[in-house]
Image (cartoon, rainbow, N blue to C red):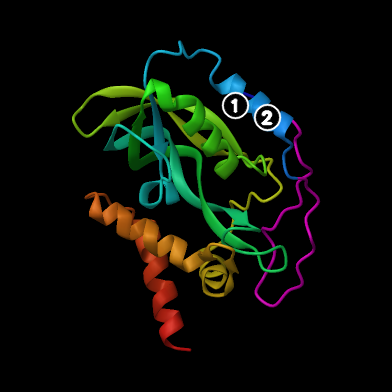
Amino acid sequence: MSAPGRPKRESFERQREGSPVSRPTHDRWTGAQMQASLAACLARWNGRSPLWVFGYGSLIWKPEFDYQARQPAHIHGYHRRLCLRSVSYRGTHECPGIVAGLDRGGSCLGMAYRIGAADVPRVFSELWEREMFLGSYRPTWMRARLRNGRLVEALAFVVRRDAFNYSGELSEDELVGILLRACGSKGTSLEYLQRTVAALHEAGLRDPHLERLVHRAEHRASKR
């Protein structure tokens, strides 16, 4: 599904600690754009069946919506990656933070939520307000295998590589630097990563790359 109102992208990838940050050119999506995107996503829903949502970052530890059930799940074709600069929740325009996106390739362990049919319009509207206000994701239906072996079709928010804040080529050293200095309206980028790793552990899931980043950031912070 192509996203309406595509913003102009200004890459954050070459920003280094201590370098000036220019304010990116983009606009918050309008209500009409949000509604068009949501309607396109739900176009094939029959209005009677429950729907599934796949969470891979903050949706694991802070879903903020009603659900009937949740289970660990595994998807293929996309992997979790710290590749989306946050200019609101976990950083600012002057000091952008970093959060996870689903990027192409590999696979990802996360949490699948079953949303009751009666709750779908409200819950999905809330999800769009939370995740889609900058148009940085492409809502995508994909197959997810639940821990009990069942295959379900689940909605996931896949990062748009043409988004103004996509930064998929940052090195681990650059990521650690961002984790240590960026803070937004919902807290620091490091806290976001720590809570994601902790939630994965609580569900019996692992992400060695994120665990290594947390360890490196915490070790470097302890040396300050």
The furthest residue to the bottom: 224
Instruction: Say whether residue 165 is magenta.
Output: no
Q: Given the image, on which type of amino acid does mark 2 rest?
A: Ala
Tell me how far mark 2 sits from mark 1, CA to CA.
10 Å
> Foreground residue, 140 or 122?
122
Q: Decide which of tag 2 and tag 1 comes sooner along the chain.
A: 2
Q: Is residue 170 left or right of residue 22?
A: left
The picture places residue 5, in percent across and down from the top left corner, at 76, 33
Q: Nearer the viewer, mark 2 or mark 1?
A: 1
> Foreground residue, 70 or 25?
70
Q: Given the image, on which type of amino acid does mark 1 rest?
A: Leu
Above or below — where is 80 with respect to 68? Answer: below
Q: Report the disc number at residue 3.
A: 2
Q: Secondary structure at mark 2?
A: loop
Magenta-colored span: 4-27
- Which residue occupies 38% across, 32% down? 76
Above or below — where is 199 with respect to 136? Answer: below
Which SS does the magenta portion mostly show? Answer: loop
Q: Report the disc number at residue 157.
A: none
Residue at the disc numbered 1: 38
The picture places residue 99, in percent across and down from the top left corner, at 53, 55
Above or below — where is 43 with respect to 174? Answer: above
- Which residue occupies 40% across, 36% down? 54
Q: Secondary structure at mark 1?
A: helix
Quadrant of the rendered image containing residue 216? bottom left
